[in-house]
Amino acid sequence: MDSGNAAWMLTSASFVLLMTPAVAFFYGGMVRAKAVLNMLMLSAGALAVTAIVWTFWGWSIAYAGKDIGGIFGDPATGFLLKDSMVSDHGVFTAATNNANHYPVSIDVAFQTTFAMITVALISGALAERIKYSTWMIFVALWITFDYAPMAHMVWNGGLLSPTGAISQAIGASAHDFAGGTVVHINAAVAALVIVLIIGKRKGFGKQPIKPHNVPFVMLGAFLLWFGWFGFNAGSAFGANGTAGYAWVSTTAATAAAMLFWGFTERIRTGHYTALGAASGMVAGLVAITPAADVVSPLWAMVLGAIAGVLTCLACNLKFMLGYDDSLDVVGVHGVGGVTGTVLIGFFGSGTGLFAGGNWRQLVVQICIAAIAILFSGVMTAIIAFALEKTVGWRVTEAQEVAGVDLSDQGETAYDFAGTASSILKEVK
């Protein structure tokens, strides 16, 4: 066993686990005060339900199960983490090492956290109007039928992998280092589909709906940047030079995206806002994710700058087109994920159109992005529509107006009445 690799991957898994609570604060600060607890709970539910599903069959579908058509793995092969690497009847043990010389159990831990953060990202588009109970059912179904198969297709030799049918047909290896397709495009498309099914919040487009706690948003963004080092540098699957460079390229791209989001915002509104800085950070992190190991420092910054501008502009599409993506999951993660995935075709060292002169890399990157969009859209539509027609997604209009925290959690984040009354008593 390589103890250095093992230690780094366990650390990376812990970093990525932190990303879901970071998302909870990032999203929680952007909603109104009457919905912040529900927003935090949606991330908590994503953590808990995903951990159970991944242990039972998610890991097997994504990584351990026998390949079925390049789309998914057999859920029975690695059911309850049965160790198919030893024998068909072996029980999962921490002693079994993978090709990078650390226990397979650490891979399970690392990939569990990826699944958690991906489904948690979707919740931002659905803020202030959905039932927690429906959300938990959705998480279980989506991880099973969408996320795990997508991970298999991209990262386990499936249809969209470097050795898959798409790459072989085009003659170039598809590249998604840490989740441009599997995580960000996948989550954003799912978010858009659900939003179109469940409809808008009351007052959307007619009255201002402002963040209630911008410091929460900034805290979440900073924690996401920290956790992303596990996300990207951890995707090197070892304590090595690729991990080190992924750290560097991630920071460079994120910094550029934050600055160029700010420049764009300044031109459009006259201000550099804290909310914009936080959103720009996340946009850069998203965009560099698929490309962190294959773009030079210069191209990493260019990629981040492009993503900062495009995502800033894209967040206005919801008002132009009339879909209520509450916290800009589509604008940031969808546009950012597509930007990073496709720009590998231009900036990828030795393969991209600008950095290697190979047009095939661009074609294969466009293809995997398009197929990821299609797969996520179809699978999510089936799941979301079924839930809409059975248990239902939304709280009642009266509950939404009063606040989903009260209707769903039976509590509020802030005791405004209590605070006011105590101040009055002190004055008297």
Image (cartoon, rainbow, N blue to C red):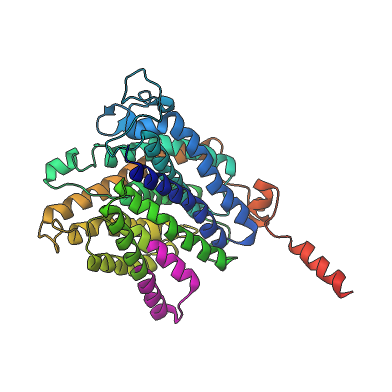
**297 drawn magenta:** no
Q: Position of residue 126 (x, y in %)?
A: 51, 52
Q: Is residue 265 left or right of residue 362?
A: right
What secondary structure predominates along the stretch shown in magenta? helix
Q: Residue at x 11, y 45 (%)?
A: 171
Q: Residue pushed farthest bottom?
A: 270
Relative depth, front residue between 217 and 123: 217
Image quadrant assignment for residue 216: bottom right
In the image, is residue 51 above or below residue 13? above
Marks counted in the figure total: 0
**265 drawn magenta:** yes
Image quadrant assignment for residue 371: top left
Q: Residue at x 34, y 53 (%)?
A: 232
Q: Quadrant of the C terminus?
A: bottom right
Q: Residue pushed farthest top?
A: 89
Relative depth, front residue between 182 and 237: 237
Q: Residue at x 41, y 33 (%)?
A: 58
In the image, is residue 346 above or below residue 160? below
Q: Quadrant of the N terminus?
A: top left
Which contiguous range is marked in magenta? 257-283
Q: Is residue 13 left or right of residue 88?
A: right
Q: Is residue 103 left or right of residue 211?
A: left
> Do we see residue 337 in this rendering?
yes
Q: Position of residue 396 (x, y in %)?
A: 63, 48
